[in-house]
Image (cartoon, grey):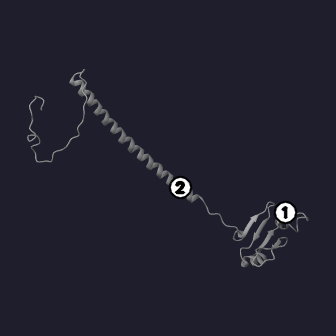
Amino acid sequence: LDIYGQEIDDSEVGDNDEEPVQDEIMTVEIDLSVNALSNAKKYFDQKRGAVAKETKTIQSSTKALKSAQVKTKEMLKEVQVAAKISKVRKTLWFEKFLWFISSENFLVLAGRDQQQNELLVKRYMGPGDVFVHADLHGASTVIVKNHLYAAGGDSTNKEVPPIKTLC
């Protein structure tokens, strides 16, 4: 039915050759206590509010995306700067051996294999250092470097590091 109460034939609607477009069926509530203008104004205001909300959402999402891109670039720059700043520490001469510093601050060195054992004794063992070796085939040679002897400390510490270091 049209607005005048006349019946409309389905064949008359859509005389053009395009495919018919199926619109969503939307239920509209009409408030009978107000006039038609007030009802229409209410729905137009809702549509206008929805369009404004959509525009604000698009703007805020664009702004958030740009902000995230800026933060990502800043973080990448910080990581690159941190990578450039960190220098590699130069290894010390004794780090190729097994080593530790005792509680009395003596450097204790041990060979990893037979070649390093010989190198420790021939090249790095000095006067005042203590030589420790187990009587087993393949055991590591251990040297306790006596820094007190080289520094010219008192006569009691010149010959041997304290017993605690050797235990």
Is there any visible trace of residue 48 in the rendered image? yes
State which quadrant residue 135 falls in: bottom right
Q: Quadrant of the C terminus?
A: bottom right
Relative horizontal placement of residue 137, taking residue 82 as reference (left or right): right
Image spot of residue 48 (x, y percent): 29, 33
Q: Spot the residue most to the top.
A: 33
Asked whether 9 or 85 is in front, the reply is: 9
Relative horizontal placement of residue 55, taking residue 76 as reference (left or right): left
State which quadrant residue 92 falls in: bottom right
Q: Quadrant of the N terminus?
A: top left
Q: Amino acid at mark 1?
A: Lys
Relative horizontal placement of residue 153, taking residue 65 as reference (left or right): right
Asked whether 137 or 5 is in front, the reply is: 5
State the residue at coordinates (53%, 53%): 78
Give the labeled residue for mark 1. Answer: 164
Q: Residues within 10 Å of mark 2 (few under 14, many from 20)?
A: few
Asked whether 94 or 12 is in front, the reply is: 12
Relative horizontal placement of residue 108, taking residue 82 as reference (left or right): right
Give the labeled residue for mark 2. Answer: 79
State the residue at coordinates (88%, 64%): 157
